[in-house]
Amino acid sequence: MDRPRDEFDEAVDYLTKNPWAIRDAFHFPETRKGGVLFRPISRSGSINQSLVNHDLTKSCGCPVQIRCSFNTSYGTTLVAFTDELTAMIGKDDRIPLDSYDIQPKHLEAFADIQRRVKYLRSIDFKERV
């Protein structure tokens, strides 16, 4: 591994050892151990900050919700905070289309996405200051 271990590695390790906890972490990403993998792809990473650039017609979702919205025509459209991220996640076949299908083998893909998003958030914050 070329990088130091981070919160996403810890989440992958925990949920791999405790796969029964994946559903709970998915449904309560801000409060459950391992939930960092399933946080919304909003500018802040918070569920409460879900509007995309103050556009009331768009809401940010987690990677599963974004992938499902990108690949289906039913239900609410959920996106990431940039069109590029939405397309990247939507095309990532490592992410299941349904939360019930999440297995330990998928967790590293969630970690990769959340790491990338964390980096992009840090750049966005620096540009705004």
Image (cartoon, rainbow, N blue to C red):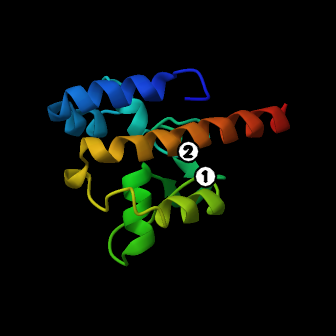
How far apart are labels 1 and 2 at the CA level? 5 Å
Q: Using a 10 Å C-alpha cutoff, classify the residue at mark 2 as few (fewer than 14 neighbours), some (14 to 19) or many (20 or more).
A: many
Q: Which residue does the numbered mark 2 point to in the structure image?
A: 42
Q: Please state which amino acid type lies under the numbered disc 1.
A: Phe
| Residue 79 vertical position relative to residue 29 in the rendered view, above or below | below
- Residue 81's x, y, as percent? 60, 52
Q: Residue at x 46, y 43 (%)?
A: 40
- In terms of secondary structure, where does tag 2 sit? loop
Q: Residue at x 60, y 57 (%)?
A: 85
Q: Is there CB contact under 8 Å for labels 1 and 2?
A: yes
Q: Residue at x 40, y 22 (%)?
A: 10
- Residue 73's x, y, as percent? 37, 78
| Residue 2 vertical position relative to residue 98 in the rendered view, above or below | above
Would you identify the image quadrant in which residue 87 lies?
A: bottom right
Q: Which residue does the numbered mark 1 point to in the structure image?
A: 81
- Residue 14's x, y, as percent? 29, 24
